[in-house]
Amino acid sequence: MVKFLLRRLGLMVVILFLVSIIVFSLVHLTPGDPARMILGQEATEEALQALREQMGLNDPLYVQYFNWVTNVLQGDLGNSLKDNTPVLTVLLQKLPVTIQLSIMSFIIAMLIAIPAGIISATRKGTFWDYFGTTFALSGVSVPPFFLGILLIFIFSISLGWLAPSGYVEPWTNFKQSMLLMIMPALAVGVRLSAEITRMLRSSMLEVLEADYIRTAYAKGVLERGVVIGHALKNALIPVVTVSGLQLATFLGGAVITETIFAIPGLGRLVIDAIMTRDFPVVQGAVLFMAIAVVVVNFFIDVLYSILDPRIKLTGGQ
Amino acid sequence: MSKKVKVFAAVFMSFLLFLTGCSNSNSSSTGTEKSTTASAPAKTDKSELVVGLDDDPPQLDPHFSTAAVDRQVFHSIYDKLVDVDEELNFVPMLAEKWDISEDGKTYTFTLQKDVKFHDGTPFNAEAVKFNFERMMDPNTGSPRASELSSIEKIEVVDDTTLKVVLSEPYSPFLAALSDRAGMMVSPTAVKEKGKDFANSPVGTGPFKFVSRVKQDKIVVEKNADYWGGAPKFEKIVYRPYADENVRLTNLTSGDVDIISKVPPKDVEKLKNDSNLTLSETGALGFQGLYLNHKSEPFNNKALRQALDLVIDREAIIKVALRDTAVASAGAIPPGTWAYDESIKPKKKDIEKAKKIMADAGYPDGFEFTLQLSPKPVEEQISQMIQSMAKEAGIKVNLEMVEFGTMLDNMDNFKFDAVRLGWSGRTDPDGNIYALFNTEGSINYGYSNPKMDELLEQARVETDQKERKKIYSEATKLGQEEVPFIFIYHEKDYKAYKNNLQGYKHIADQMMRFHDVSFK
């Protein structure tokens, strides 16, 4: 176990190092001069030159990379080029917003997917199964941005029940925060729920065929007991993987949803920073997301082995 | 077996708790958020105005700002030395009056008395001097420096009198002071905060900065001691809505009171909405095609003229812009004092274009690449140009590029033509000199001694009638020389709730809320 953990941790460091190089090069090799983006179309050559110097853009690329990494390792992600705010502060401001959206989407997804998956599997071939699979198929096919617009149209414009967009911190006004977040969370969550429903249905069907289920029935365990107590737990293993991966991508994946619902989260931050060539913010945010994905995956692996003892954490021998 | 379920649940719950734990600790570490009270989704508060902006303002320091959207917020926080009224005349603001010497070189400003910055610092001639010097200092790196470059000497006569001597007459000077170069920031705050000033701006304006959450909101509150009388709102919340549909939805649903930009496709719909007022005015800029004069094909005047003649401006305005623009004959937009009605926009004339090309040795037309930003309206305009040009045998290749890349290509002359415009300036000099003069900041290789002479002359001329004549002559020369293909002048639209009163729509497109209130 310890060996496995160490190996995974080592791998994480290597991955993050590679990510840092890729992020850095991508940002610096894209055409477009950040100084020009900041000063605008009419800036004079002297002003541009002065700003480039100030931003260290005249240094060779490897020097810039080295400076950046050295600072990052000391916890300094640099300052935004636009208004000089430390990148770390900006990220920490955005993080709770995206986490709130992710958690709510995740809960919504689970609330829909687990019953739907179980019913589809246990009532295979019935109306409910078709209903569930149709839902899953449409959920996967409908992009979140479309669903988002649809929700705004129905609940804000036609019915007038919910505000179309905006954000309020939960600690300022919990109820309002939840009301504002419910539509974006649905837009993101439905897609995940559809994926999980499909996943759960098929793995559930597989598990229900297994010998030990038949044994359980033979021993006289009631159907509910078999499904919930025996089958569900084992069928959940692949589901954990899928949802774990999804949870990681939530951090950056809700970009369009955040734009549609005017939610000030990480996704929009990155888009805005890219549009204005705010290098330090782009680098910081992407690096941050990469760390999040790697860390979440690490935990998923650990969780996986706890759920299924057949998966041994022995470092790959 | 159930033990493992419990383990799973425990791990999962602790993960969630860890995440929520993060969020709480972060909230307290970023203190600015605490002080903001969230705006209610269903708005009932009449002392609070919610403004929908078209983008998130990058900068709150006027001396560093280059984005138009920043200025929307500046007008609440900062005062300018000079303002413009609905007819675009210069009117007093922080400068109560000004005298311009006979030779047009010395400006003597008399400043408002008893004005204080939000932090208590007195506003006086010293403060203005400090502001000018800050912008002019090359170490500041302010984009304003070029607008103030003609200043030779700044002299503080007394607390309320400031003399500015220019090295040569520069007529656009007052216009510069009616924009960001004339916005006064608190010297104390700048000295204390340095570069961080952009995050806690201090001006003398009708509203004080309270807090900002990027991409979410900027909150300002009433400055009860405002020298021009306290404003009517306790608070203004600026919210950025980059997506135009989202912006409009929030206005129609009642969550936002006024929006800064209305997409052309929705103008008609808003005109018919009885709950909302749609206000229209001409804007100050121009839109069209930038041409690269340093290489083929547009270093050839005949080919520029031919392209100019194949464009049906009215068709573009009607189809792509839904009549939210007017055809353009030059850099000076209608509604401004220098506009000359007698100069008409070019009409489409395929035969003439073909003849010009044949005479210049291009009987079969020519080919070029037009770069454009990936936006639906831009695409439509460019495709229309493409098919119009085809009629005369000109082949247009369309290339979509992201904005930063586009600017980069322009800087490096890696383009034939670019579909882009210019947001415009209050003084015509800011539109026309920049575009037509050899040294102009948005000129891409065009140079003509006659044109340079005219534009320099217009800069130093102080009589407005004479200036207008010179600009007309330059515009006519521009129609002949075609340094830029002018297509249209945009109109500016603001939409707001009917219960909002006192709103004046000024062509500089900036929203001023000092005199605005709810009925």
Image (tube, coloured by chain):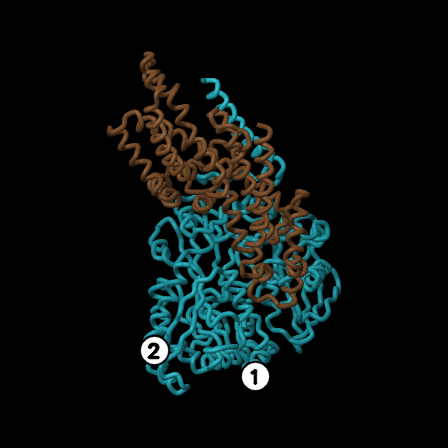
Q: Chain of mark 1?
A: B
Chain A, hue in figure: brown
The amino acid on which the numbered mark 2 sits, given as a three-letter code, is Ala
Residue named by callout 1: B449
Q: Earlier in the sequence, mark 1 or mark 2?
A: 2
Residue named by callout 2: B392
Residue B2, image x, y percentages: 45, 18
| Label 1 – label 2 distance at C-alpha | 31 Å
Which residue occupies 47% across, 47% down? B518
Which residue occupies 57% across, 70% down? B441
In the picture as drawn, the residue positioned furthest to the top comes out as A220
Give whichever of A65, B284 is nearer the camera. Answer: A65
In the image, the chain rendered in cyan is: B
Give whichever of B162, A17 is nearer the camera. Answer: A17
Mark 1 or mark 2: which is in front? 2
**Image vertical order of residue A217 relative to residue A110, above or below:** above
**Image vertical order of residue A142 relative to residue B157, above or below:** above
Could one spot residue B138 in this view of the protein? yes
Could one spot residue B220 in this view of the protein? no
Give whichever of A315, B507 is nearer the camera. Answer: A315
Quarter of image, res A210? top left
Residue B24, image x, y percentages: 58, 32
Please state if B143 lies on the left or on the right of B280 as rendered.
right
